Amino acid sequence: MINDLVTDNRVHKVAESLQKMGFEPELVGRLLPESQPVTREYKIHRMKLLFRKGAMFYAEYNLRLFFFLLKSKSDVFVSNDLDTLPANYLASRIKQKPLVYDSHEYFTEVPELIGHPFVKAVWTWLERLLVPHVHGAYTVCESIAEVYRDLYNVDFKVVRNLPVCSKIEKPEPPEKIQGQPKIILYQGALNMGRGIEAAIRAMQFLNGAELWLAGDGDITAQLRQFVDELKLESKVKFLGRMPLSQLHKVTRQADLGISLEEDLGLNYRFALPNKLFDYIQAEVPVLVSNLPEMKRIVEHYQIGAIAETHQRKELAEIMKRALFDQEKITVWKQNLQKAAVELCWENEEEVLRQVYGRFL
């Protein structure tokens, strides 16, 4: 991983699952000056690098990773995303060891590459060169898996980034006081393209409700100023970043969880955000964008509403129905209990066994 391994929950869950299967995983990442200590039940190796971003960073990281892998006694190499695939591919070829590719997103369609045609072309070339030669592959949703299967004729499995249900504490939600505002919750990074501005605009036309923003990010200051300009301080609350245990308690208080990602390229179009599954585990009805993967989950389980538009008045009306239509809410709440049981990491582990079992 090119991150410092502190907060990457997906690779941690995969490593724990591999341990249960009988592997001895070792995660490799980088060490930043501000990185927190990491203590895990498996090996961790973090590298100090000279560069922090740009082409020189990726070149340095893959070079350092390549030499580390050459010296390792690993029997299987696992590349988490395209930016670690060059080093893993070369090491696997030289040492004649199997290579597994875990694609966390549609890498060549991330917003950071849109508007940078040369950089995107380089990553696309690397993907076309390397992905057809992996010995096992999986990704985060069916839409991305279908694209990769068609492009590279590789059998990509789907391992969704679901919560480990056995580790989730489910405190009872506090009793609602009559007349208390309904709570609309957004949890996660406060970044562009997440539909947060649209939700704030909609609050101008929605009474009897508050929007809670649990998280921090690149546009936090911009969002605070936006709320001030619209004079919505009484309706929009910034909760900041909080520990997972505290966040679970906040989520249980919500009446509606929102995931209103915008259609900013294929990576966002195929988004299946962690917060959607966190809402489901807390048995909170959801409101999601009309994007294929989120829509598929919500319609399959009948656990909430689809926002066909981000226009403020129309979105406010959709939120109002989702918050106050008691007949629908009763059905959604019943269905959420079933969804919470099925949408667990423990069920995704069966796919990991299919991918890795043959290498044991």
Image: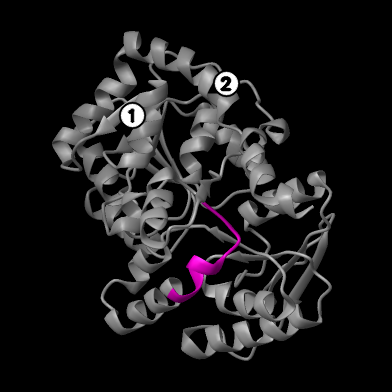
Is 215 part of what is drawn in magenta? no
Query: At numbered mark 2, what does the secondary structure look like: helix, strand or loop?
Result: loop
- The magenta-colored residue range is 129-139
Marks 2 and 1, how far apart at CA: 17 Å
Left or right: where 168 falls relative to 283: right
Q: Position of residue 6 (x, y in %)?
A: 68, 62
Task: Give the total number of marks visible in the rendering.
Answer: 2
**Residue occupying image coordinates x 15% and y 34%:** 314
- Identify whether 71 is placed above or below 246: below
Count residues near mark 1 (Cα–Cα under 10 Å), then give few for <14, some for 14-19, many for 20+.
Answer: some
Give the residue at mark 1.
209
Residue 208 lies in quadrant: top left
Q: Amino acid at mark 1?
A: Ala
Give the residue at mark 2.
174
Residue 33 in view of the camera:
no
Residue 149 lies in quadrant: bottom left
Residue 4 in view of the camera:
yes
Q: Position of residue 354 (x, y in %)?
A: 65, 43
Left or right: where 154 falls relative to 344: left
Is 135 part of what is drawn in magenta? yes
Quadrant in which the N terminus is drawn? bottom right
Q: Amino acid at mark 2?
A: Pro
Left or right: where 302 falls relative to 75: left
**Residue occupying image coordinates x 59% and y 23%:** 341
Q: Position of residue 98 (x, y in %)?
A: 68, 65
